[in-house]
Amino acid sequence: MNPAQTSTGGSASNPLLGAWTGPFGLPSFAAIKPEHFPPAFEQGLAHHRAEIEAIAANPAASDFDNTMAAMERSGALLTRVSNIFFVLAGANTNDALQEVERDISPLLARHDNEIYLNEALFRRIDDLHRRREGLGLTAEQKRVLERYHTHFVRAGAGLDADKKRRLAEIGERLASLGTAFGQNVLADEKAFALVLEEGDLGGLPDFLLDAARAAAEERGFPGKHVITLSRSSIEPFLQFSTRRDLREKAHHAWLKRGENGGASDNRGIVAEMVALRAERARLLGYASFADYRLADQMAKTPQAVRELLDNVWRRGRARAQAERDELQAIVREEGGNFALAPWDWRYYAEKLRQARYDLQESEIKPYFQLDRIIEAAFETARRLFGLTFAPVDVPLYHPDVRAWEVKDAAGKHVGLFLGDYFARESKHSGAWMTSLRDQEKLAGDVKPIIVNVMNFSKPEPGHAALLSFDDARTLFHEFGHGLHGLLSNVTYPLLSGTAVSSDFVELPSQLYEHWLEVPELLKKYARHCRTGEPMPQALLDRVLAARNFNQGCLTVEYTASAMVDIDLHSLPAAEGIDVTGFERDALARIGMPDEIVMRHRLPHFQHLFSAGGYAAAYYSYLWSEVLDADAFLAFEEKGNAFDPETARRLRDYIYSAGNLRDPAEAYKAFRGRLPTVDALLKKRGLDELAPAADA
Ligand SMILES: [Zn+2]
């Protein structure tokens, strides 16, 4: 009750307003309540606004320090509050946080718009940009100036007042719609639970039964089994359940997320967002949103993206048709008198996989314990980059979250790594990397706090958490993003870690997946959860041989989603678009096989609409895969998956380099040349296939 404290506008009682004073500079999660966020955001926004105004109104002529560096130093409180808020909103949300999220998204969008459309500020940046060659800037400073200038121009700086006002409205509206979109998907996922009775469990392996029991407990059906729409629940169910009727029911619910009518239906939101994006692109002088979006990507144009997608689609579709014929033959052999349907594909593919490779998920899973796969990811980072990871016991936002202190080869602190691995109702689906604090050197030697979030099924108490091979790959993927944040070594926050174009940002993550398949690593870490025995060589051989099994289907699922995304965002105008009809027509045009559905249908395509980061950019994963396949080849050419010289260049030019360079230049600096698509086709096993003539 110190009056000096209460007079500071409540900062003493609002833990979000002060510096983070927990271990490693963590925030005090236990003290943070949802009601602390609105006033903290309000103060953060007000501070930042005042800072920006001061920069714009500075009577001194613009120089790098009083304009660019000043911009980079501004907004510290807002960044802190936002970082912690969005970590919680993604991984541990509740009704109160969701309400804050709905309120704050348009305010943050408006705030960004105010900065980017600040005329006086842009004049200072534009003036500096014109004089950039004569300013004696370092390469990094020049990059900062160029990136800011590009951001401002792409946001509409320099346009007339009417257009700017409209762009601002569009930005805010898109932010609100994006929040509603994500919350609607979560609502549909929460609303569905397939409650299984004793007679409904046919074919389900132990790991799925365990997870389904745990899910039933959480959903209020103790003693029963529940399948949810989390990918780690529904996918194995579709793969193993012998009950065709239940597979159809679950698949239907999965497919219809965001398309169920009522308050959570996302089709109106999608239509409005696509129309607004097209309008934004027009205002900025682009033919379509895709043209606008891709101009600042490594790909540069929709044509370049389509070329890659078409090439892979032809081969993937031909492979998928051959796979379908094989699966249909099994249906016939078993006396089934029906055409293979989407809810049958995974089930019969699993049968074929077992017949061909004698691989049973239940045989493999005991060898992929979560804790050992985490260790394998750590060891890879040690052998490539000299990093070590030591567990630390610190208070975090949920009891399931774990923390490790990361040090370099010299024992110097690199950062803190948080792993939040298990699915729960309060968490959005999917897997992602995010940060509580990004690396930079402008505000002192700031070390990163990086978070990996996944949705693995939580085991029952006393049981080891077991992963599928795909889960293990997801862990390596997100850990690769994590290293991009942890190893970041830049001065300016703008360029830190993963702040690169979205068709480049998946390179560090997808490349990292390759090390999971390095035999010596698998031999060491894929050990049986009960016996501790390493995976038998024969089983390991079969696991690796089966890597490209079902690759046609996977390629079609993904590539179709990427093609529909590009088509949708290439519309010059999209007012009143019929979302379901557009999707159907787009798929018909490319000859989508009836037995396969898009990996993400438009009404729940969170990459495109939830945050919008991948709108017209879902192709990025494939683009990055061209890069990662070609990059791993650099190690293979040396005959050593941990070749020190290649690892050093990888660290210097990719993992630690943030956005210091144009992505194509960064890649060339690492590899000595630009990538070709050959390694990707070989990796997917699509290189030996003659393209189908009718595609
Ligand atoms: Zn990723």
Image (cartoon, rainbow, N blue to C red):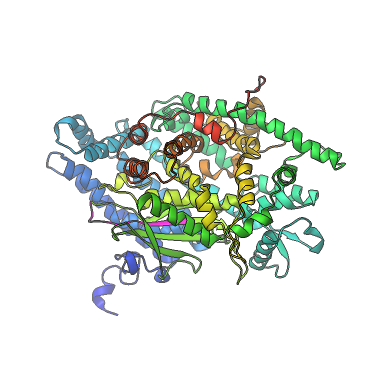
Which percent across, then down, holds residue 542? Answer: 64, 46
Is residue 325 depicted above or below 446 in this figure? above
Q: Is residue 613 above or below residue 4?
A: above
The image quarter containing residue 152 is: top left
Q: Is residue 134 left or right of residue 318?
A: left
**From this viewpoint, is residue 192 visible?**
no
Is 18 located above or below residue 563 in the figure?
below
Asked whether residue 451 is in view, the answer is yes
Tell me the residue at 70%/67% (across/down). Answer: 221
**What residue is rendered at 80% in x and 40% in y?**
330
Work out whether residue 360 or residue 653 is closer to the camera in this orientation and state it: 360
Residue at the top extreme, as displayed:
693
Magenta segment boundaries in residue numbering: 442-452
Number of numbered discs:
0
How far across and down, in percent of the image, does residue 445 sit? 24, 56
Q: Residue furthest left?
A: 60
Q: Is residue 446 magenta?
A: yes
Query: Where 474 falls versus 148 (above or below)?
Result: below
Dominant secondary structure of the magenta stretch? loop
Figure quadrant of residue 259? top right
Quadrant showing the N terminus: bottom left
Task: Give the camera-side residue of 394 and 55.
Answer: 394
Q: As rendered, which of 541 and 51 lies closer to the eye?
A: 541
Q: Position of residue 403 (x, y in %)?
A: 42, 64
Was residue 597 drawn as part of the magenta stretch in this picture? no
Q: Quadrant of the C terminus?
A: top right
Does residue 77 appear left or right of residue 529 in this picture? left
Using residue 18 as the reference point, say whether residue 350 is left or right of it: right
Compared across the picture, whether 462 is left or right of 128 comes to: right
Observer-nearest of 123 and 71: 71
Task: Point out residue 22 in the picture as x, y percentages from the top left corner.
Answer: 34, 69
